[in-house]
Amino acid sequence: MKTSSSRISGLGTTIFAEMSALAVRTGAINLGQGFPDTDGPTAIIDAAVDAMRHGHNQYAPGTGIPALRRAIAAHQARWYGLAIDPDTEVVVTTGATEAIAAALFGLVDPGDEIIVLEPYYDSYVACIQMAGGVRRPVTLRAPDFRLPVDELRAAVTPQTTAILLNSPHNPTGMVLNTEELDAIATLAIEHDLTVISDEVYEHLTLDGLAHTHISTLPGMAERTLTISSSGKSFSLTGWKIGWGTGPAALVRAMMTAKQFMTYTSGTPFQPAIALALGSGTDYFDAFSHGMRDQRDLLCAGLSDIGFDVFVPEGTYFVSTDIRPLGFEDGVEFCRMLPERAGVVAIPHEVFYDHKEVGRPLVRWAFCKRPEVLIEALDRLRVLTPR
Ligand code: PMP
Ligand code: GLN
């Protein structure tokens, strides 16, 4: 009996599931998988409860309820000055995860080459593989994880059809700067490439750094499919409401694939996220300032313990090099850590083709209450050499 396809060969279990299960099994503090330990705003949760109580419990339209599509378009106008047609240029998805899958299944043919930034989010390469595409990683290196523009240029071949970006970048926390975005745009236009831009951390730049939406650059609106999600911006990762925006042809390709994966996404959550997207600047400021304080707390503590800490500009993750503490292998380190210190983290290595680059790097999530971060740091002090 056949029990699996070549399409999923080697995909195994995601590191996030493995490490969260390890945290539950060992009772360790989970600084691995990126989810906050506090809920999103009560008014938004109440809006979802209200929607459930008032009959919003059957299939939503495939592209999403009109109120949410309008709210997404209004959000893009307000934050980035983009004019998006809510009827043809927006599709609501089951988290950014489905948006990524639908984009890749809708746009990639077998043999197409897709450029990804390495370390990459694991679902990118899984979906490229399932679509029959070929990934071409361009490596971001510590300490600052800047984009090596020459390497990006060299990665383009006649088979390249798309660049898959992520900024603010998980797991490094790097935020693409103007020169890097310009270089990507120039290359995309020169080679007529599609850009798929995963911006789930768009509201998590931490030092007042502006997040630039690549589709606002000249010539980019017509070739950029932007993906985002309510999970990170509103601390509601379990609701799985994401979206894609961009030119109608790209959104249509995504929708065509999406309709045969989930058809539609969580109806009662949609009016609540429509409300959330209209939140005032004070909400977004308080959110990123709180996360910045948590970053500073965790980074200072990890540095005290002896890690080499690469302070992130965005996201809610910090990456460290474990070698100053006498370790070499991040996977081994993360498997031993719950037992040794009662903390869970994520090894970078699983996000690379060039495994040796990621081997000594480990990612820590700081989207946890300050008292939890302090307790985790207390526990990690056992690692400091005496
Ligand atoms: N892209 C990146 C870079 C992520 O870190 C995540 C995790 N939130 C996702 C996509 C998936 O988002 P969602 O939970 O909305 O599916
Ligand atoms: N995006 C989150 C992270 O990077 C969660 C990922 C997941 O569970 N698939 O930790």
Image (cartoon, rainbow, N blue to C red):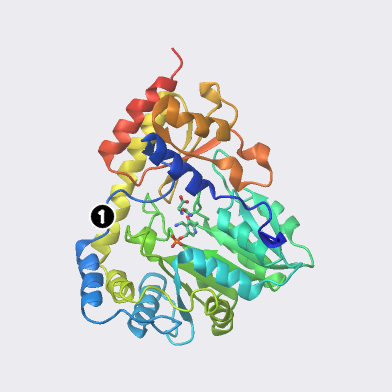
Q: Is residue 195 left or right of residue 62?
A: right
Which residue occupies 40% across, 65% down? 240
Residue 197: quarter of image: bottom right
Q: Is residue 367 above or below residue 201?
A: above
Give the amino acid type for the residue marked by disc 1 in the picture: Ala
Q: Is residue 313 left or right of residue 9?
A: left
Residue 376: x %, y % from top left: 34, 32
Residue at the right extreme of this rendering: 158
Q: Is residue 224 left or right of residue 51?
A: right
Residue at the top extreme of this rendering: 386
Q: Is residue 228 above or below residue 286?
A: below
Q: Is disc 1's CB within 8 Å of ligand 1?
A: no
Which residue occupies 43% across, 58% down? 201
Residue 316: x %, y % from top left: 40, 48
Residue 160: quarter of image: bottom right
Q: Is residue 88 above or below residue 297?
A: below
**Mark count:** 1
Residue at the bottom extreme of this rendering: 87
Q: Which quadrant is home to the C terminus?
A: top left
Residue at the front extreme of this rendering: 1
Q: On the image, numbered disc 1 is attached to which residue?
A: 286
- Tell which of 383 and 212 is nearer to you: 383
